[in-house]
Image (spheres, rainbow, N blue to C red):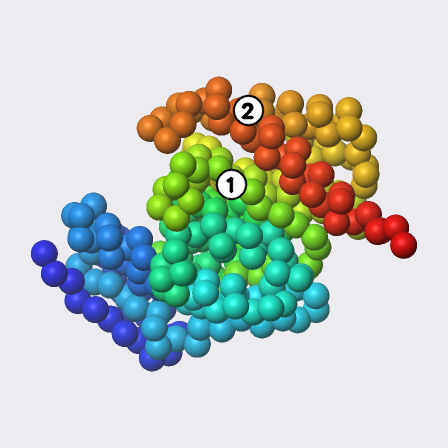
Amino acid sequence: MGFELLRPATVPQAVALASAAAPGELAVLAGGTDLLLDVDRGLVAPRRVLSLARLPWHSHRWAKGGLTVGSAEPLRNLELDPRLARRLPGLHDAIRAVGSVALRERATLGGNVVRAAPASDLLPILLAYDAVVDVVGPEGRRSVALDALLARSREPALGHGELVASVAIPTTADSVYRWQRVRPANDVSQVGVAVVRSTERPYWRVALGGVPSRPLRLHDVERELARARPTREELGRAAAVAGASAPFVSDKRASEPYRRRVVALLLTRSVEQLLARATPKAG
């Protein structure tokens, strides 16, 4: 079954087309790395596909210490920006975890947000950074916290006719993203751990991917990491809480006990890495 490709030239045109479509009739195309595969496999059958190719959402900008990324900006453009690894190293880590260079030439941050996949490598670090999503629709524009937008697995809390225009990370702080999978370039991550270290309270923000039904913040773990420089014992307790409390399940990618051990280990290594980077070198 074919579909009609819509290529609006302006944001109002795009919103009008999205609003006019019946529920379930329209799919939005940013990079298409997931959507086109789903169409080819018969998993979805939209009557219309609305392309963002001609909209002014293909850029990113630094301002006020943070970063705003247009929803159609390819991940590869971010990866090649030398400021990213310096200012948001965790996001750089997460982008590098996404498939191959060829895939990152098309995949987008906005597409990952709308996809809202539980095993996304990008959503945990965005959650840890308290990312905010700019949404445009028939009622105008609104900003919504990413955590609130990820209401259900693969069903972001968008109203009818609403489109994601951009994703904003409001501040920069040292960060790291670590993941575990069998084959780095091909497989979906079994576990992904994002950690952000701030110079202000809360000093640590932790988010997790690879869990049902959506990536999530580990607020109980953050409470265990109450100090800027936790002791080994405090870090051990935080890792134990992470391994015990995360809602893991066993599936074809990994068992629940394995995931619990891995998330505790990745959290420990991530915090240790950030503490080492914050320690002045002698001499």
Which percent across, then down, holds residue 129? 63, 51
Name the residue that disc number 1 marks. Answer: 179
Which of disc 2 and disc 1 is earlier in sequence?
A: 1
Viewer-proximal residue, 36 or 4?
Answer: 36
Q: Taking 231 as reference, is 281 above or below it?
A: below
Q: Are there few (<14), some (14-19), or many (20+) residues within 10 Å of tag 1?
A: many
State the image coordinates of residue 67 (x, y, percent, origin top left): 61, 65
Which residue is painted at 58% across and 25% down in the image?
Answer: 243
* Residue visible at 49% across and 27% down in the picture: 259
- Outermost residue to the left: 1
Task: List the residue tagged with mark 2.
Answer: 261
* Residue 232 seen: yes
In this rendering, position of residue 173 left or right of residue 7: right
Q: Secondary structure at mark 1?
A: strand
- Of the residues shown, which amino acid type is indicated by label 1? Trp
Choose top left, top right, bottom left or bottom right for residue 17. Answer: bottom left
Q: Position of residue 220 (x, y in %)?
A: 66, 30
**Residue at image point 40% right, 36% down:** 182
Q: Which image quarter holds the C terminus?
A: bottom right
Q: Alpha-carbon neighbours of circle 2 within 10 Å: few (<14), some, or many (≥20)?
A: some
Q: Are marks 1 and 2 in contact (CB under 8 Å)?
A: no
Residue extending farthest to the front is 283
Residue 160: percent from left, percent from top: 35, 56
Q: Residue at x 56, y 31 (%)?
A: 263
From the image, which quarter does the N terminus lie in? Answer: bottom left
Q: Is residue 114 visible?
A: no
Q: CA distance from mark 1 to mark 2?
A: 13 Å
Q: Secondary structure at mark 2?
A: helix
Say what amino acid the circle numbered 2 marks.
Answer: Arg
